[in-house]
Amino acid sequence: MNQTLRVHHPLFGSLLYDSAWVGEKQVTFFGQKQQVLLTIDGDKEKPFQKRQEEAFQAFWLQGELLLKRTEKALFDYYQQVRDEYRTQVEKDVVDLLVPNVKKRKDIGFLVECIQIFVPEAPHDTRELGLFFECTWEEEHMLAVKFRNEQISAIGLQEDLF
């Protein structure tokens, strides 16, 4: 029988191992508190890289600022891709799934943060990803990638991680 491995990490909190280390954290996006999945890439024998701990700690310490930057980046990204996605959606639901959004706060109705991902990263690099479900891209998650606490890319999760 396969026993579930659980640990309590002083930084990450309570985690269990299921092909990666998984837990939960609470974040505030667009003024709404949300529980999100916390996933730390790693294996049972060598659970966490120092860089992963540093990436998460740096992100968490600057959380409010970095989440506000993420909100702006999501709004800007949406403005760039909106017209293309509008051509791909049925006309009867286009304004519901891919509306013309004029205010940054309104993008919060179209996206939901569901995961913080802390990958194994190259030497001297702190990486972290935020994954979102969004109304305009139902098949793939949207990702915001941070490198050394700066947004380095926004796009589909499968393309960035």
Image (tube, rainbow, N blue to C red):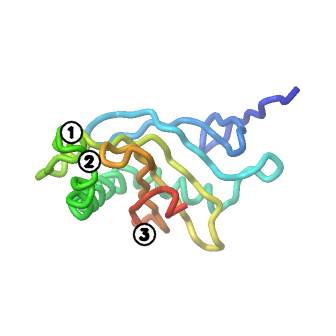
129 above or below 33?
Answer: below
Marking on residue 93: 1
Disc 1 crowd rating (10 Å Cα; few below 14, some 14-19, many 20+) is: few
Whether residue 91 is visible, yes or no, is yes
Q: Is residue 151 left or right of residue 107?
A: right
* Residue occupied by mark 2: 89
Which residue is located at x 64 percent, y 71 percent?
122
**Residue 30's quadrant in the figure?**
top left
Camera-nearest label, 2 or 3 = 2
Picture coordinates of residue 74, whole percent (x, y) = 29, 56
Q: Could you tell me if the residues under marks 1 and 2 are in contact, i.e. CB atoms within 8 Å?
A: yes
Task: Identify the secondary structure beneath mark 1.
Answer: loop
Which residue is located at x 34 percent, y 44 percent?
134
Q: Residue furthest left?
A: 102
Q: Which quarter shows the N terminus?
A: top right
Marking on residue 145: none
Q: Residue furthest top?
A: 1
Which residue is located at x 35 percent, y 34 percent?
33
Distance Cα–Cα, label 2 vs label 3: 29 Å
Whether residue 72 is visible, yes or no, is no
Picture coordinates of residue 16, whole percent (x, y) = 69, 35
* Residue occupied by mark 3: 152
Amino acid on which disc 2 is placed: Val
Amino acid on which disc 3 is placed: Ser
Distance Cα–Cα, label 1 vs label 3: 32 Å
119 above or below 26?
Answer: below
Q: Is residue 152 left or right of residue 52?
A: left
Disc 2 crowd rating (10 Å Cα; few below 14, some 14-19, many 20+) is: some
Task: Identify the secondary structure beneath mark 2.
Answer: loop
**Residue 53's quadrant in the figure?**
bottom right
